[in-house]
Amino acid sequence: MTENGGRALPSCEFWYCDVLGLYDARVFREAMAQLPWPERRAKVDRFVFQKDKCLCLGAGLLCAHALREAGAHDLAMDYGPHGKPYLKNHPHLHFNVSHSGTMVACAVSSDPVGIDVEERQPYDEGVARLCFTHEELEWLGRQDDADQAFVRLWTRKESYLKLLGTGLSKPANSFSAMPGAYPEPNMCFCERELANCALCICTRGHAATGGSIPLVSLCNGSTMRGTSQCPTEEP
């Protein structure tokens, strides 16, 4: 539990997992049988490409594991007006998932939370001009590694938008999330560099603790994982 501004703040836990092993047909079948949501299984089946199937399945498995670890016994879901899912019988638990490359990630908190993981990619000036503010573009121009800075800034902005859960109703260029800038008071960005991805968790005023979990642990219900506190930036 972290304190800020004189009030006790809720905790946040996150997990991430490389789901490359789901490309094995036997592992994929066994993992599908573990998925608790029929609608998620149907979504997996609707994808054409195996990469998308594996990411969708892996994200679902990780989400179910994270919610059970947080104490949720009934995983029945419903959806908000902008399509953000929530647990019908555990409304106090907030969660968010993300995936990119072969990595899936999930964050669970007692407050709204957003998480984004992005595979490293080259700096795209066209996307940057469309989605970033003038101040963010200037910040990007000062960075030695434009590719790394681009992905880092993207995950910060995306994680905040996912915390809001309002879809595309808030334009990405209507706020700044570069290091040292905060879209709201008491906002925190918890960042981690992975092997080939950038990860960011956005919370309202509290640190995130978590780490990696092997795919086999998701498939057999184990809780083994590497845990540490994520570096946190807050105003």
Image (cartoon, helix red, strand yellow):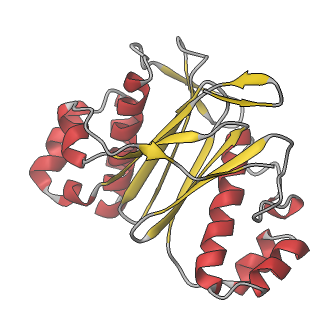
* Rendered residue at 50%/40% (across/down): 209
Q: How many marks?
A: 0
Question: On the rendered structure, is 25 left or right of 48?
Answer: left
Residue 166 at x, y percent in the picture? 75, 41
* Rendered residue at 30%/42% (across/down): 225
Residue 206 at x, y percent in the picture? 67, 36
Q: Quadrant of residue 210?
A: top left
Question: On the rendered structure, is 157 left or right of 99?
Answer: right
Q: Quadrant of residue 23?
A: bottom left
* Rendered residue at 60%/16% (across/down): 91
Work out whether residue 147 or residue 124 is closer to the camera in this orientation and state it: 147
Residue 35 at x, y percent in the picture? 29, 33
Question: On the rendered structure, is 146 left or right of 230?
Answer: right
Work out whether residue 87 or residue 93 is closer to the camera in this orientation and state it: 93
Q: Quadrant of residue 37?
A: top left
Q: Is residue 49 visible?
A: no
* Rendered residue at 75%/64% (across/down): 179
Residue 74 at x, y percent in the picture? 41, 13
Q: Is residue 171 visible?
A: yes
Which quadrant does the N terminus fall into? top right
Question: On the rendered structure, is 66 left or right of 31?
Answer: right
Above-or-below relation of 121 to 65: below
Above-or-below relation of 101 to 124: above
Above-or-below relation of 157 to 108: below
